[in-house]
Amino acid sequence: MNNKHVIVIGAGFAGLTAARELQTAGIEYHLVEARDRIGGRAWTDDRLGRPLELGATWVHWHQPHIWAEITRYKQDIVASPVVDRAYWLADGELKSGTEAEMDAKLARPMEKIFEGSREFFPEPHKPLLVLDEDFGASQELKDAFLAADAASVLDPLEDGDFTQEEKDLCNAYWSAGYIGNPATGSSLMAKQWAALCDHRLSLVDEQTLRYKLVNGMRGIYNNIARDLTGEIRLNTQVAKIEHHADSVTVTYANGTSETADAVIVTVPVGALSHIEFSPALPEGSQKTIEKKWNSTGFKAWIKIKGHHNIFGYAPQPNVVSVLRSEYFEDDDTTICVAFGADHTKIDLTSVEDAQKAIDQWRPDLEVVGVTGHDWVADDYSGQAWATLRQCQFTDGWHHFREPSTALHFAGADWANGWRGVVVDGAIETGISTAREVIDKLRAAGSNADLTQVA
Ligand SMILES: Cc1cc2nc3c(=O)[nH]c(=O)nc-3n(C[C@H](O)[C@H](O)[C@H](O)COP(=O)(O)OP(=O)(O)OC[C@H]3O[C@@H](n4cnc5c(N)ncnc54)[C@H](O)[C@@H]3O)c2cc1C
């Protein structure tokens, strides 16, 4: 391999797994990370008196890449509680029932939202397959696919006899699921999630919000880092990347620079505007960086007095869209997880703000603590999990997957399968992008290497 060297930018799941893949192939690398910690948008930290996930939390055995890591590092999962009482604000009223009753109300409109998932995603890990000329889809299907990308996730409900209660429940669900305004999020994303979940709402819920890691995400990202022999440089922010056919020069915020045979950038779209690329990225990528994704929301942990096993749903413009009890503490408190579409509407350190959110469902409950991390305001993420605006499914993420120089992108934002929303997609691209780089460097290396591949 003639000592080819790759710089991996970002020590989240994509960067860590890309580095491990390079290491396995015998390629030299080092990782650079702007923060003072690894993990990126996965961050298990001690808050409110216990370990809490400020970013990624839930995992599932139907997510193949994260499940392989769970197996590799012998991690265990635990189910989130099944709640006793659900509350939902709908049609201007506060309603209440069991979780099953609330789920039953979501079933009919969600079926409409998922409509087309089988035809649009015959192979869910090849998201643009129906547009591929070789696949041979009818023009009618291609047109319907493009139209679904131009539509918002809630638009399908405008076409039918859906009640305001059904619309409000879906509005709350997708404000949290899309971690942004559902009125501007592409409807194709929900349909692809359905395809990844056997077209069933119950499996979407199971895959995204049911099973947590006993040791937290740090039980996995720390283990991957332990397996790496290459250097991980923390507090090292990249400011500029000059890229050519066979080499790259990376310049850091402190003014130093270094050259390598290739670079793998795992920085999410929301933070890419802080890096100068020379030559400039293709127009499609630039447009995406400028617009960013639909991801403007937040996740918060809210601690309330007493043990209360509850679930809450509230549509826009309420600040918190979804709330669920997660931990019942020994000091007779409950820690709930909360999601909302707009990070500017809440101060994640303000008990008063959290109390206002709880009051919309249960004014009798007293908030005693709140925490979270504002990922949208964070310069190294600029977004929560990646969710696509209208038209970005067919004109957005894939521009970053077409390398023409020694500059390559990996990261959950650009995954084929579970794009953005879960760690699984970050690992998928860590592996696939590293393999692209390995193949390219091998092809540029000795004949002996090529013979080995053949
Ligand atoms: C609030 C929230 C909740 C989530 N919940 C779940 C969940 O329940 N389950 C799940 O599986 N996933 C969840 N996710 C999604 C998951 O966290 C991400 O998909 C995944 O962690 C992304 O990994 P990544 O490596 O692609 O990107 P990142 O983790 O963002 O890694 C990119 C790295 O690049 C670094 N970086 C940025 N700019 C620079 C620079 N200029 N120079 C050097 N380094 C730089 C960053 O600091 C970061 O460490 C959640 C995400 C958020 C935000």
Image (tube, rainbow, N blue to C red):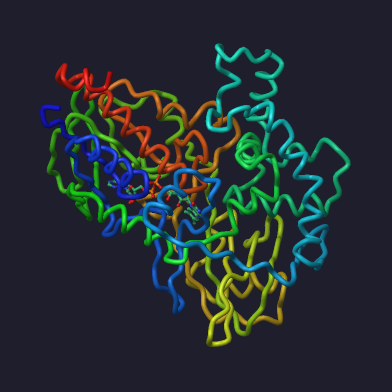
Residue at the image point whose x is 53% and y is 50% from the top: 61
Examine the rendering and report whether any part of residue 245 can be seen: no
Asked whether, in this view, residue 205 is left or right of residue 216, the answer is right
Q: Nearer the viewer, residue 447 or 379?
A: 447
Q: Nearer the viewer, residue 351 or 95?
A: 95
**Where residue 263 appears, x then y in whole percent?**
25, 34
Dividing the image into 4 quarters, which one contains the N terminus? top left
**Measured along the vertical axis of the image, is residue 299 above or below residue 419?**
below
Quarter occupied by residue 142: top right
**Measured along the vertical axis of the image, is residue 10 above or below residue 319?**
above
Quarter occupied by residue 110: top right
Residue at the image point whose x is 58% and y is 64% from the top: 79
Quarter occupied by residue 194: top right
**Where residue 84 appears, x then y in whole percent?**
73, 72
Residue at the image point whose x is 25% and y is 56% from the top: 226
Q: Nearer the viewer, residue 204 or 408?
A: 204
**Measured along the vertical axis of the image, is residue 233 above or below residue 111?**
below
**Where residue 379 appears, x then y in whole percent?**
36, 51
**Where residue 248 appears, x then y in whole percent?**
19, 30
